[in-house]
Amino acid sequence: EAFLFNREGPQTEFKRQVPANDDDSKVKVMKTVCAFANGEGGSILFGVDDDDGLCGVPSQTVDRLKDQLTQMVGSWVEPRPRLDFEILPIDGSDKVVLELRVEAGTGLYGCAKRGETPTPYIRPYAITVKARPSEIERIVQSRPVSSTYPLSRLYR
């Protein structure tokens, strides 16, 4: 209820469902994971539609969905950010909201399909956008040098 009250923002994103197997639906979620890792962390809530309505995901699919999301992040986001999940029951329903929590990172994170050059993203307000060079520099300067992902891999 607290997430719904505060709506989407710099650290909260709502998704009706976990992305299907097509890259177009995956990339939107993975860019947000990347942006959360480049910022102060954040949560993606699966089972909440854009109108802040609870639609939930079937509780019996949660373990499969967690595995699917973990694998997706590992394939799309470099380096792999720290993740955690929370299962939020919906009163009077056999459905739940699945919360994917992304911790604030210790380096610079990029998102791309396998074989492509990862691109860093940030999350100003409630949107995810490609990071500009000055924003990349700010992220790198705010992180320990030893843990920063090589810029040559992320910077185009």
Image (spheres, helix red, strand yellow):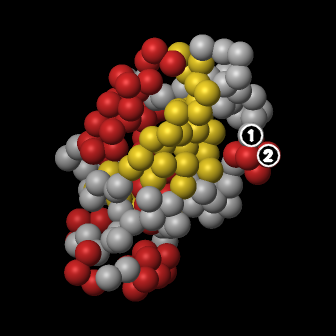
Depth check: give the residue in front, 129 or 138.
Answer: 138
**Count of numbered labels shown in the rendering:** 2
| Residue 17 appears in the rendering | yes
The amino acid beneath tag 2 is Phe
Q: Is residue 78 above or below residue 96?
A: below
Depth check: give the residue in front, 142 or 102.
Answer: 102
Q: Is residue 6 above or below residue 91?
A: below
Examine the image and state in which quarter residue 109 appears. bottom left
Give the residue furthest to the left: 115
| Residue 35 appears in the rendering | no
Closer mark to the observer between disc 1 and disc 2: 1
Q: Is residue 129 above or below residue 63?
A: below
Q: Is residue 104 above or below residue 144?
A: above
| Mark 1 in CB contact with mark 2 (< 8 angstroms) | yes
Q: Is residue 6 left or right of residue 83?
A: right
State the CA–CA distance, disc 1 to disc 2: 6 Å
The amino acid beneath tag 1 is Glu
Say which residue label 2 marks: 5
* Residue at the spot 62% in from the left edge and 50% down from the top edge: 12
Say which residue label 1 marks: 1
* Residue at the spot 55% in from the left edge and 43% down from the top edge: 44
Depth check: give the residue in front, 75 or 118.
Answer: 75
